[in-house]
Image (tube, rainbow, N blue to C red):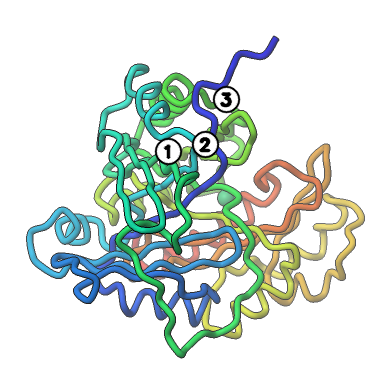
Amino acid sequence: MAQEDFLPLNGTDFVEFWVGNAKQVAHYYQTAFGFQPLAYAGLETGVKDRTSYVLRQDKITFIFTTSLVPDTEISQHCNKHGDGVKYVALWVDDATKSYEETVKRGAKSYMKPTTEKDENGEVVMSGIHTYGETIHLFVERKNYKGIFLPGFVKWDPLYKPVDVGLKYVDHMVGNVGWNEMNVWAKFYADVMGFKQLISFDDKDISTEYTALMSKVMANSNMRIKFPINEPAVGKKKSQIEEYIDFYQGPGVQHVAMATDNIVKTVTALRNRGVEFLKVPMTYYSTVLERVGEIDEELAPLAELGILIDRDDEGYLLQIFTKPVEDRPTVFYEIIQRKGAKSFGKGNFKALFESIELEQESRGTL
Ligand code: FE2
């Protein structure tokens, strides 16, 4: 009989970024990525030291928070890391039990279970540390009817560009330092009860110049998937090492967002200013030999630079943005799954050669 899951997770609740200028970042995610305004907290709602904008697209909720004063945890975080992910919040039915079960298995406490109330009910939140300065929050909202969380008001600006068809967070990748991948894979296994789905070593993920290693950890219902990357030795500097240099430590590398029409979504994103990595056109002259027949026309995929890979269960279409900020740190993946449950191993080489060209132009290879 299967063991009972001590940490049942309903999905990703929200991802909170700590940024230098939340107003302008929120505008970028509306304009470029089609997120819709949802909620706001700041001076007008009685918060004195920070401002937060909450944006949503289908099941994906992002918060962008900035500090209004110097020397806060938020302003120090931005000073050190640049704009980056602080909270990866997980939606649970019992935030107290989630906290107790993980802390008892060795998680470092960030926030004891705390209840916030307003006229719409109550939310219980707790938190534990993960890699770097990143935090997992557990959010229990079954007794809450409000727009987002207590303390937030509806944010309803005039400007509302349409969405681009992004549906849910497929996976979120963490970059950790040398020899730390196994430490964090073990953390997700021991402390959170995750299982290892896949492991890639430097022979799977290497080009002539650079290499990395990765283990994908997933919870029991597979709604939460966290690949963990570490750099590997190559002739030149791994993209993971470049990230860690610029982020000044481990952190979230990319968020993969699912769509059910990648050509439409990526066309819209590109028209709205999102920049994507491009693979050489030669990729498309042999790709169908590797992946077999697909439902889509190849020409639009090639035109947009969308990559294709297949596993035993089906195939997937994926593409990666360039970093969305000036430090070469956080970026996004857009993914459409057509049966495949894997992560695009067949594309790694072409993709990393493309990233190396970008690194070369930054002088960080
Ligand atoms: Fe990914």
Q: Residues within 10 Å of mark 2 (few under 14, many from 20)?
A: many
Q: Amino acid at mark 2?
A: Ser
Element assignment for label 1: strand
Q: Residues within 10 Å of mark 3 (few under 14, many from 20)?
A: some
Residue 2, position as x, y percentages in the image: 67, 14
Structural distance between the alpha carbons of marks 2 and 3: 14 Å
State which tag comes first along the sequence, 1 or 2: 2
Q: Amino acid at mark 3?
A: Lys
Q: Which residue is mark 2?
A: 214
Q: Residue at x 67, y 48 (%)?
A: 344
Residue 349, position as x, y percentages in the image: 62, 50
Residue at the farthest left position: 71
Q: Residue at x 42, y 54 (%)?
A: 15
> Where on the picture, by quarter, is residue 164?
bottom right
Pointer 1 and pointer 2: residues touching (CB < 8 Å)?
yes
Structural distance between the alpha carbons of marks 3 and 1: 18 Å
Q: Which mark is residue 230?
A: 1
Element assignment for label 3: strand
Nearer the observer, 163 or 255? 163
CB of residue at label 1: within 8 Å of ligand 1? no
Residue 177, compared with residue 44, is above or below; it is above
The reply, left or right, for residue 94 in relation to residue 305 is: left
Nearer the observer, 79 or 41? 41
